[in-house]
Image (cartoon, grey):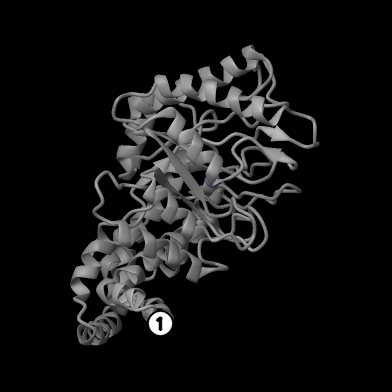
Amino acid sequence: MIDKDLIAAGNAAQLDALTADYEALGAHLARRGIDIDAIKTKVAAYGVAVPSWGVGTGGTRFARFPGGGEPRDIFDKFDDCGVIHQLTAATPRVSLHIPWDKAPVSDLRAKAEEVGLGFDAMNSNTFQDQPGQALSYKYGSLSHTDPATRAQAVEHNLECVEIGAALGSKALTIWIGDGSNFPGQTDLTGQFERYLEATAQIYAGLPADWRLFTEHKMFEPAFYSTVVQDWGSNLMIAQHLGEKAFCLVDLGHHAPNVNIEMIVARLIHAGKLGGFHFNDSKYGDDDLDTAAIAPYRLFLVFNELVAAEGKPGFTPAHMLDQSHNVTDPIESLMLSAVEVQRAYAQALLVDRAALAGFQQENDALMATGELKAAFRTDVGPILAMARFEAGAAIDPVATFRAAGYRARVAAERPAVSGAGGGIV
Ligand SMILES: [Mn+2]
């Protein structure tokens, strides 16, 4: 972890400037009828989960260039995730991936407690074969034509639930690579029905207070069709399974230019929005850093979420899901967590009564201007002040670099190669 004195020293050097910026922004927001401290309180209570696989250097479908000091196992990953939360106070939970993160439950619990983190949704893996696995997922898992292969995939998911229940997780996220690469390769209807039947068996094994998240994805690794291709298929699945089943929206899993905030609105209407995998994309499932490409789109998603705040049972799960090829994963994840917080804070600034009035009067110009006014407000001082008051770093990246953490773990952790990327 990072030395507390180092964080304090960095903060002390920046506190006067931050205080001046915060007060200036507070005066500006007060003129708009907004209490800056109320926004700060909501931001401080907001958290986004970090995926365990995100702290390793990811890669593309073509290659992986390992970075220094990459985590060797889940315990190293917990250390890295602990640093992210220590410096941002924005990532209180880690999302585990089985089997990549498999370890004795008591050891996992002890490590999480040591670094001050909780457990978010569990992630199963039937999109690749593991050593010693009896039946291959080459031609599918939960939707495979062979009943024994489907049963194996169901069994794996139930094991993930069992491990998660022992850890204190409350959700299972399923993403499968099932689909087809050629027209005619599969019976599109039969494959979907086999998936529904298998997933219902997983659903039946969920503890009473758990949620099941299914994640749609338009393409990759199957390039002609995927079983859970889009939010429509996903909604059918959630409605078929029952009240504990919800749809998970990964921002990169749609066709270019798809209106994701409208999908979010529709899933909210249906009571089936389970949560998010935040990342950004230019072309496909690029898994770029959140808000690196389209920060306004992220804001518009949060605009829908803030509008739905307070609805009964509306508690979507928020997680980052990125692949870091050319940056330090810890730095990317810290900044991405801050970007998600930023979109949330900006969305909180929208005058919802004014917006509703403009919409009612069909005043498109003023309505869109209301959103732009919120988006263009620099809420950075609110986020930094929330971090400072939580004992985190006013400038997380500068503090991380000053601490020399990467060099330190690089000396302890031997260089690793290929395995365990993770673009889902
Ligand atoms: Mn994802």
- Does the residue tagged 1 have its C-beta within 8 Å of any atom of ligand 1? no
Q: Residue at x 60, y 34 (%)?
A: 176
- Look at the picture and state if 180 lies above or below 163: below
Q: What residue sits right under mark 1 in the picture?
A: 369
Badge 1 element: helix
Amino acid type at circle 1 is: Gly
Q: Residue at x 32, y 78 (%)?
A: 14
| Rendering coords of residue 412 (x, y %) | 53, 45
> How many numbered marks appear?
1
* Residue situated in front as seen by the camera: 361 or 243: 361
| Rendering coords of residue 254 (x, y %) | 60, 53
| Rendering coords of residue 241 (x, y %) | 44, 28
Q: From this viewpoint, is residue 318 visible?
A: no
- Look at the picture and state if 413 lies above or below 331: above
Residue 277 left/right relative to 379: right
* Residue situated in front as seen by the camera: 121 or 19: 121
Residue lying at the far front in this picture: please name it: 361
Q: From this viewpoint, is residue 51 visible?
A: yes
Q: Residues within 10 Å of mark 1 (few under 14, many from 20)?
A: some
The C terminus: image quadrant: top right
Residue 39 left/right relative to 255: left
Q: Residue at x 46, y 56 (%)?
A: 405
